[in-house]
Image: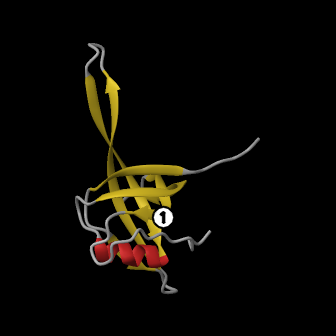
Amino acid sequence: MFKLNYVVLSGRLTRDIDLKYTNSGTAVASLDLAFDRGYKDASGNWQNKANFIRVKLWSRLAERSAENLSKGDPVTVEGSLEMESYTTKDGTEKKSIVIVARSLHYDWKKDDSVKTDDDVPF
């Protein structure tokens, strides 16, 4: 069976990008993406449902995105899905799905081209 894990979503940033560095100095950033899903309700009227997902960026892509993007900016993300586990402050274990971005397309404020980054560490 062929296995494929590829996601493309477009939406808007719900907050400014959070840029951090690992102990080894690699840049890692996270952003929250809001996107809509259209559907017809029982009356036949079109509705939009807002959805949200976290996106993780690595290396130069993380740094460039944090420099050039802010809350509300439209982006298109290409990447793969990954399950993350974490423990809340009260000790409860939780899991969530994130997109690990391979590329992020948007109107660059400092340079007018589309940038991508293929050096995702996995």
Q: Say what secondary structure mark 1 lies in.
A: strand
Q: Residue at x 38, y 51 (%)?
A: 10
Provide residue 9's location: percent of width, then percent of height. 42, 49
> Residue 73's image quarter?
bottom left
Which amino acid does the dot numbered 1 rest on? Ser
Q: Is residue 25 left or right of residue 34?
A: right
Provide residue 41's location: percent of width, then percent of height. 30, 19
Provide residue 42's location: percent of width, then percent of height. 30, 14
Q: Residue furthest right?
A: 1
Q: Residue at x 31, y 77 (%)?
A: 67
Quarter of the image that includes the N terminus = top right
Total of numbered circles in the picture? Answer: 1
Nearer the observer, 60 or 97: 60
Q: Residue at x 59, y 72 (%)?
A: 121
> Residue 45's image quarter?
top left
Q: Residue furthest top?
A: 43
Q: Is residue 101 above or below residue 68?
A: above
Residue named by callout 1: 103
Provide residue 27's location: percent of width, then percent of height. 45, 79
Nearer the observer, 115 or 94: 115
Q: Is residue 94 above or below residue 37?
A: below
Q: Is residue 93 above or below residue 15?
A: above
Can residue 92 be seen from the camera position used here?
Answer: yes
Q: Residues within 10 Å of mark 1 (few under 14, many from 20)?
A: many
Nearer the observer, 37 or 84: 37
Q: Is residue 11 left or right of residue 95?
A: left
